[in-house]
Image (cartoon, rainbow, N blue to C red):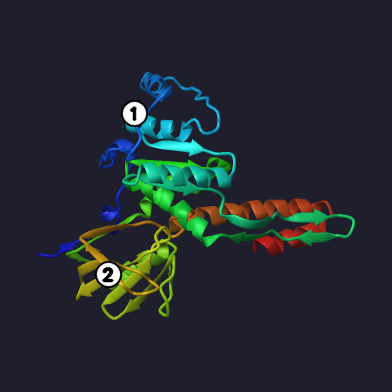
Amino acid sequence: MARSTNWRIASRHFCSSEELPLTEFLVESPFQPSGDQPAAIAKLAEGINGGLRYQTLEGITGSGKTATIAWLIEQVQRPALILEPNKSLAAQLASELREMMPTNRVEFFVSYYDYYQPEAYIPSSDTYIEKDSSINEEIDRLRHAATSALLTRHDTIVVASVSCIYGLGNPIEYKNHMLLLEVGMTIDQRQLLRRFVDMQYHRNDLIVERGSFRVRGDTIEIQPAYDQEAIRLSLFGDEIDAITFFNPLTMETRGAVTEVTLFAATHYASSSETLMSAMHRIRAELALRLEELEREGKLLEAQRLRSRTE
């Protein structure tokens, strides 16, 4: 019998890594720890398990520090966040860890800006320069892949630059926008499409691209923001009959699954209540600031603020 569902019930809420399905961290390498590595791994593992907050692993270039860290993660069986000072080193380390731990999720999280121009004002010429930026779509996809892995897989390692210390939206709102779809689930197609829009996916009936969905009769196709493959939902009436993955470029089917979890197309997804509350606060603050500027005779500044906000 088909099962009806409620979007809130279907949305999974993982509050901590302990609630995730346990998958073992496993190093696959033809080599074994040698030299000073066994002692270093044992000492570092002892410190981590004992609650020691700070430890330092020292070694010259080529001494196998990356391999030591991989074996350490395997030893302690804990998810890890590894910070690198720049994108190049982060990409190199992520690539090396993926080779050593192919069955685990090793994700890459760095700044997604190819170009960023902050807003500026030049008083001498009364010139205002608007903020401008260009986002790298592939890096944005990898960032989404990292956050989705953290919520669905225990065996996750994130290699990041200092970009990870900056705010990334509300994690509770992000979790609330998770959507679980299962074969046999009874749904209303209009409600499902409305749910996709709430998750910041946009409709494009011409092509399937990242962060979009399209509808063709009883078939709905959507490409998650974090995946290179798209998902096809085949409906039979109001019931999900099949869920398959496919290549959006070649349309080749990759395989079928019984359930799939979708995440929002942006890390900044918010509920309508949150948006309305924010809008009211912004309008109230705008009114106060405009009154202050006009009282000081700064009419140009007030007009610029009004045009930028309203």
CA–CA distance between discs 1 and 2?
40 Å
Which of 15/222 is in front? 222
- On the rendered image, what quadrant is the C terminus found in? bottom right
Between 81 and 290, the one lying in front of the other is 81
Of marks 1 and 2, the one in the foreground = 1
Using a 10 Å C-alpha cutoff, classify the residue at mark 2 as few (fewer than 14 neighbours), some (14 to 19) or many (20 or more): many
Residue 111, x across and y down, in percent: 56, 50
List the residue tagged with mark 1.
76
Quarter-of-image position of residue 157: top left
Marking on residue 233: 2
Relative horizontal placement of residue 94, taking residue 85 as reference (left or right): left
Residue type marked 1: Val
Q: Tell me: residue 67, above or below residue 293.
A: above
Image quadrant in which the N terminus is located: bottom left
**Sequence order check, earlier mark of 1 and 2:** 1
Q: Residue furthest left?
A: 1
Q: Amino acid at mark 2?
A: Leu
- Report the residue at 57% width, 47% height from top: 88
